[in-house]
């Protein structure tokens, strides 16, 4: 999911993994588009949106498919107005049945506006609504047999996401450096 905040010229990317016995990249995007909701981005600036979703099958051969969302309300931030803090994000944690670093998933939602936080604490009502929206999204994807998973490339595993929780404190993502 490619985020853009046009006024700032900044962008960000979120990566999620899904598993299904059979299906195409277009099938997955269609389900994502039908189940995503603005509440999932409740702590993201309303000036930011997901403009494209690229689906990349991990079969080693099928090409990626980039889908343009058109940035309607359901793909746009629902947070407050005002300036956002470029380095701050909301962490959405994904829980699996296994413990350990390789089995914990996180999504770092960008562009947290100043109005959505105070001294690093996010507005609790916004976080609670965001967590509920994510839980609804995950349940809907599972009901359509597209199982959201936490993927471990180290262990070559994909564990089903069983729970979700947006955190109440802002965070920063440790940047992955190219080697």
Image: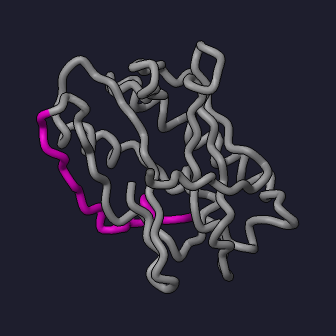
Does residue 5 sit above or below 152 in this rendering? below
Please check the rendered image and state whether residue 76 is part of the magenta-colored stretch, yes or no.
Answer: yes
Residue 93 appears at what percent x and percent y? 63, 37
Does residue 122 sit above or below 160 in this rendering? below
Main secondary structure of the magenta stretch: loop
Residue 62 appears at what percent x and percent y? 12, 37
- The one of 136 and 26 positioned closer to us in this rendering: 26
The answer to whether residue 169 is left or right of residue 17 is right
The answer to whether residue 68 is left or right of residue 119 is left
Residue, far right: 119
Question: Residue, x 48% and y 75% (percent of image)?
Answer: 10
Question: Residue, x 42% and y 21% (percent of image)?
Answer: 158
Does residue 101 sit above or below 10 in this rendering? above
Question: Residue, x 73% and y 44% (percent of image)?
Answer: 167
The span picked out in magenta is: 61-78
In which quadrant is the N terminus drawn? bottom left
Residue 18 appears at what percent x and percent y? 36, 31
């Amino acid at each position: 999911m490619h985020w853009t905040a046009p006024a700032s010229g900044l962008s960000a990317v979120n990566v999620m993994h899904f598993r299904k016995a059979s299906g195409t990249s277009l099938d997955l995007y269609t389900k994502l588009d039908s189940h995503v909701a603005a509440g999932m981005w409740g702590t993201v600036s309303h000036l930011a949106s997901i403009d494209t979703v690229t689906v990349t099958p991990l079969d080693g051969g099928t090409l990626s498919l980039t889908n343009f969302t058109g940035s309607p309300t359901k793909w746009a931030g629902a947070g407050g107005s005002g300036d956002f803090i470029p380095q701050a994000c909301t962490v959405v944690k994904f829980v699996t049945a296994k413990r350990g670093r390789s089995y914990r998933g996180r999504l770092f939602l960008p562009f947290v506006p100043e109005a959505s936080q105070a001294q690093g604490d996010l507005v609790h009502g916004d976080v609670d609504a965001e967590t509920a929206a994510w839980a609804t999204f995950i349940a809907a994807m599972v009901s359509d047999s597209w199982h959201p998973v936490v993927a471990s490339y180290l262990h070559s595993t994909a564990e089903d996401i069983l729970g979700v929780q947006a955190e109440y404190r802002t965070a920063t993502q440790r940047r992955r450096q190219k080697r």
